Image (spheres, grey):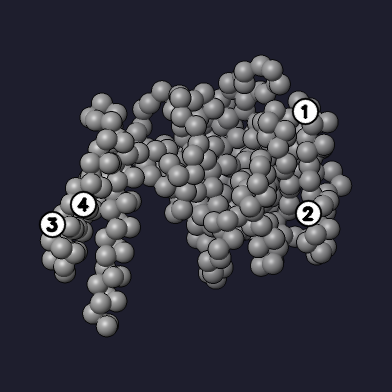
């Protein structure tokens, strides 16, 4: 009986791994090689034929695993693109230069967004002083289901300067986001370093999405370490692209990677980092938000859509969206 159960488990693993391999062929095989759907169908049919030929024996399991291993080796060899016909909002990648406490950020995004018009591209160079770093804020963005959100981290330098970082997919012209495709090597990973009037306004004023803003409990010393850790990744991605992955390298898991790297006691993994619609509550539970209000009240008071729409293109946009919020 035990041997039978092990065999059934082995068959299940062979089936699942080969379904993944077929999906990898479907999504990631270059279109100029062969139509992905045909290759994936032929692949699965061949695996079923092999299993049937060897009458679903132990040998069949070993033979059935071999095609997956071959596809996995090919898939691991796929390298992320550095040049491509990128969509305008991800056409440039940020990079930095440091001289003591002065950090020069190149390709900081500061697009202008107006309803009914295409975005006006602006890529800026900005110098920040690490000695001015005071606080870290967390934006939480909802655009549909409340089960999934997009976090954006923002660093405050002095009383009025803010640098926001949004971990996103870098898509080429003609691509659109798909969660399923995000499990395969379809999108590059990009850290968008931006002015808040860009990454906030595009969501509240242009797309009309929900956005919440919280002050974190991170102090200046850790904020410095966190910012530099982000910048190391920004520079690494500028030189050596990486793939986005909806499970292992997404907008939330990368934020956790940076926060864990800057503390001696990183928080344990939690399923809410993947189904992340309540990640703000998770951060609150772990003492990561500065407010001591009950979370329900804090969240209700932290919605900034109307503030951002009213501030629009004001030069003091960042101060206006924060005025009167809890802990600011």
Q: Which one is closest to the eye, mark 4 or mark 1?
A: 4
Q: Which one is closest to the eye, mark 1 or mark 2?
A: 2
Looking at the rendered structure, which numbered label has been put on residue 204?
Answer: none
Q: Residue furthest top?
A: 117
Seen at 83% across and 63% down, the residue is: 293
**Residue tagged 2:** 299
Q: Secondary structure at mark 1?
A: loop
**Alpha carbon of mark 4 to alpha carbon of mark 3: how far?**
10 Å
**Alpha carbon of mark 4 to alpha carbon of mark 1: how far?**
57 Å
The answer to the question of whether label 3 and label 1 lie on touching residues, with beta carbons closer than 8 A, is no
The answer to the question of whether label 1 and label 2 lie on touching residues, with beta carbons closer than 8 A, is no
Q: Which one is closest to the eye, mark 3 or mark 1?
A: 3
Seen at 44% across and 54% down, the residue is: 248
Q: Is the N terminus in the top left, top right, bottom left or bottom right quadrant? A: bottom left
**Residue tagged 3:** 53
Counting residues from the N terminus, which is met first, the one under dot 1 or under dot 2? Answer: 2
**Residue tagged 4:** 47
Q: Which one is closest to the eye, mark 3 or mark 2?
A: 3
The answer to the question of whether label 4 and label 2 lie on touching residues, with beta carbons closer than 8 A, is no
**Alpha carbon of mark 4 to alpha carbon of mark 2: how far?**
51 Å
The relative height of residue 115 versus residue 94 in the rendered view (above or below) is above
Seen at 65% across and 63% down, the residue is: 282
Residue 271 x, y percent position in the rendering? 55, 63
Q: Secondary structure at mark 3?
A: helix
């Amino acid at each position: 009986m035990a041997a039978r159960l092990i065999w059934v488990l082995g068959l299940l693993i062979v089936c699942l791994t080969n379904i993944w391999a077929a999906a990898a062929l479907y999504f990631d095989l270059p279109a100029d090689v062969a139509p992905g759907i045909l290759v994936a169908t032929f692949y699965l049919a061949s695996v079923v034929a092999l299993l049937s030929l060897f009458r679903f024996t132990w040998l069949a399991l070993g033979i059935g695993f071999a095609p997956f291993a071959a596809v996995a080796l090919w898939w691991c060899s796929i390298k992320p693109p550095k040049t491509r016909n990128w969509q305008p909002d991800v056409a440039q990648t940020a990079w930095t230069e440091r001289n003591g406490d002065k950090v020069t950020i190149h390709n900081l995004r500061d697009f202008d967004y107006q309803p009914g018009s295409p975005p006006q591209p602006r890529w800026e160079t900005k110098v920040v002083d690490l000695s001015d770093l005071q606080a870290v804020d967390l934006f939480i963005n909802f655009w549909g289901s409340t089960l999934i959100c997009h976090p954006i981290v923002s660093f405050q330098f002095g009383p009025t300067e803010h640098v926001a970082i949004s971990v996103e997919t870098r898509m080429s012209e003609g691509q659109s986001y798909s969660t399923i495709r995000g499990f395969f090597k379809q999108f590059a990973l990009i850290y968008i370093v931006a002015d808040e009037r860009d990454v906030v306004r595009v969501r509240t004023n242009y797309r009309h999405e929900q956005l919440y803003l919280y002050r974190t409990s991170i102090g200046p010393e850790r904020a410095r370490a966190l910012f530099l850790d982000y910048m190391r990744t920004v520079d690494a991605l500028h030189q050596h692209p990486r793939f986005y992955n909806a499970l292992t390298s997404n907008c939330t898991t990368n934020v956790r990677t940076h926060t864990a790297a800057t503390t001696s006691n990183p928080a344990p993994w939690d399923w809410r980092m993947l189904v992340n619609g309540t990640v703000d509550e998770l951060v609150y539970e772990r003492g990561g938000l500065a407010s001591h209000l009950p979370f329900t009240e804090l969240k209700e008071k932290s919605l900034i859509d109307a503030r951002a729409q009213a501030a629009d293109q004001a030069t003091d946009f960042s101060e206006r969206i924060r005025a009167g919020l809890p802990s600011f």
